[in-house]
Amino acid sequence: MGTSKFLSLAVALPLAFGSLALAEGAPEASPGMQMADPMPAAQAPAEPGPSPREELGTTGYDTQGREGRIHVVRTGDTLWDVSNAYLGTPWVWPSIWQDNRNIENPHLIYPGDHIWITPWEMRKVTAEEAEALLAGQPADAKDPAAGRPAAAPDLGPTGTERVRQERATVRVSDHERIGLLSSETVDAAASIVANTAPRLMISQQDEVWIGLAGGETQPGEQFTVYRVEDKVRDFETGRMLGYHVVLLGWIEVLETREESSLAVVRRSASEMQVGDRLIPRRELVGEIAILDRTADIEGRISFLPQSRTAMGTLDYVYLNRGTEDGLAVGSALEVYRRGFRAHDVARNTRVRVSDRVVADLLVVRAEPRASVALVRRTDEELTLGDFFRGGAE
């Protein structure tokens, strides 16, 4: 696997935003990898247009004077292609893609769509929004006293402390990949019990019956729909930590009955079906404040979602420590390779080789006995069983 997978946004950015000479070693999505909704822009056969690598979109500026580019989708484009062309790696878009609630099913892209791309976000915009962004001015041109906004932080190994000072928060956009629920929550969940339409799959705007009675819910209450995928077990002890789940969307209760309630699917990220479970919906925070590291917490990476065997920058890993151990959303951690005793041949003695830090993590979800962490930066592939710890800020 090419090392370009581990390029941080700040490192990859100049490849696309400063030059058309992009890294040729950037990894492509493997044929067996599931890519969810954002697949080719055109459904009907058509002559493919030029690749995003061949011509980058026009530079624009948002209302705060921050630079980005507008990409106009061509036939055959995928979000993987666009991310690879503009950000230097196809692995970035799932973590920085932002849904626009004014656009129905924003993960699908079609020829002619406009996509606003910066180091921290990718999102579809209307033609009017694109025109306004292209007409924007950099911050120093609008207000010379303000100066140009700070350069993108260096996420390299030597820039870790500077990152913490410059970025008090981290944007986390992709919540569909990071479902983690405790065993108690899953065991107590209700589910979709019937579809009002005569078909197996359930999608947006469909009405469904759920197994909650009038005394357990009320009209207007919202529930996240999820499907259990895998058990998450402690790498060291094998004990049950919880479940990895796929978040499918959310529903809103319309009417209640004596033993069940009628609800409508307000948002569908993936097709639902009878038997999928429910938990009360809560708005997911897009910006997570970075907390001080907790020095006395140590543990192991205990689960990799999507049957992956290795993870890189902007992927998610599951940890065998949670709120009961002192972790919380925003906890900063590091992955390290343990030191060892080595033989100094010249002096015929054994010396200690120190631990080596290879990655920075940020906890984005925390259950009592387990947590999900975003890989903010990594120098090497992370695998099941890797050690993590807190440390002094």
Image: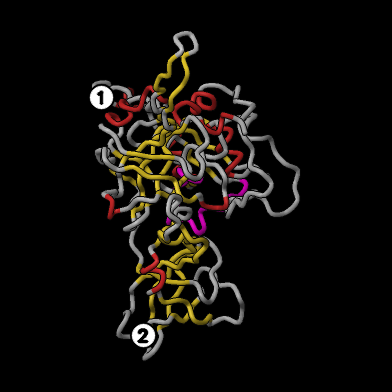
- Could you say which is closer to the camera, residue 22 or residue 133? 22
Q: Can residue 337 be seen in this view?
A: yes
* 2 vs 1, front mark: 2
Q: Contact, CB < 8 Å: mark 2 with mark 1?
A: no
| Disc assigned to residue 146 | 1
Give the magenta-colored segment's residue range: 93-111
Q: Is mark 2 on a helix, strand or loop?
A: loop
Q: Is 168 covered by the magenta stretch?
A: no
Which residue is located at x 66 percent, y 43 percent? Answer: 30
Q: Quadrant of residue 218?
A: bottom left
Q: Tell me the tag on residue 213.
A: 2
Front in this rendered view, residue 12 or 388: 388
Q: Measured from the top left, where is residue 25 in percent x and y?
A: 63, 28
- Secondary structure under the numbered disc 1 in the rendered image: loop
Place of residue 209 in the rendered image (x, y in percent of width and height, measured from the top left): 46, 81
At horizontal 33% and vertical 62% (from top left) the residue drawn is 282
Q: Which amino acid does label 1 sit on?
A: Ala
Residue at the extreme front: 348
Dot 2 or dot 1: first in sequence order is: 1
Determine the residue located farthest toward the top in the rendered image: 346
Q: In the rendered view of the protein, which quadrant contains the N terminus?
A: top right
